[in-house]
Image (cartoon, rainbow, N blue to C red):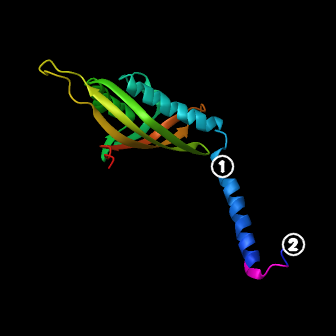
Amino acid sequence: MIFSCFPLPNQQAVALLGGALLLAGAAARAQTAPVTADEAAVKAVLTQYQQAVQKLDTTGTHHLFTANSQVFESGGVEGTYRHYAAHHLAPELKEFSAFTFSDYKSQVQVDGSYAFATETYTYTIDLRKGPQDKQAKAPIVRRGVATSVLRKNAAGRWQILSTHTSARTPRTKK
């Protein structure tokens, strides 16, 4: 054995160091693994939804969600996406002059016909100036996170089955 001239504690140290290097190499490869076609397709669904919100228009977004989808927002159960869009999101978007995302990051893990996504972002909402408002209202800025479960349907298209979003006022830097 090549290490036979070293006392046993050094052999253990070398073995541990070698194991650590192997794990570090595996972790580096995992971080640079190419995006699969399914991961890209899931991210495309998330992007389409994000773009619709930024355009302040939910028209046609129902196809991004399953018919029996569930939407949860900041501790509230909003029902299916169709219900949420019609009774919450669309009316709310009419009150905005702009909705922008920044600092957006997403992680997707695909497991067969299901995908699990986590998105983090900052969003800024500019409210429409009302007829009685003397000046524009201050923008609303929040740090948000969304977790979603998507399912690949029989046609091979990814759809959001469940999504939960929450947000808070950004912490000020000290």
- Crowd tier of the residue under label 1, counting other residues whose Cα lies within 10 Å: few below 14, some 14–19, many 20 or above: few
Q: Which residues are magenta?
A: 5-9
Q: Amino acid at mark 1?
A: Ala
Q: Is residue 35 magenta?
A: no
Residue in view at x 67 percent, y 44 percent: 33
Tally of marks: 2
Q: Which numbered disc, 1 or 2, marks the residue closer to the eye?
A: 2
Residue 67 at x, y percent in the picture: 44, 34
| One can see residue 32 in this view | yes
- Earlier-in-chain disc, 1 versus 2: 2
> Circle 1 — which element?
helix
| One can see residue 153 in this view | no
Residue in view at x 38 percent, y 28 percent: 100
Q: Amino acid at mark 2?
A: Ile
The answer to whether the residue labelled 1 contacts the one labelled 2, judged by CB atoms less than 8 Å apart, is no
Q: Is residue 98 left or right of residue 119?
A: left
Identify the image quadrant of residue 157: top right
Residue 31 at x, y percent in the picture: 63, 47
Q: Is residue 96 left or right of residue 67?
A: left
Task: Name the outermost residue toward the bottom.
Answer: 7
The disc at residue 2 is 2
Judge by depth and name the residue closer to the eye, 94 or 31.
31
Residue in view at x 47 percent, y 30 percent: 64
According to the image, label 1 marks what residue?
30
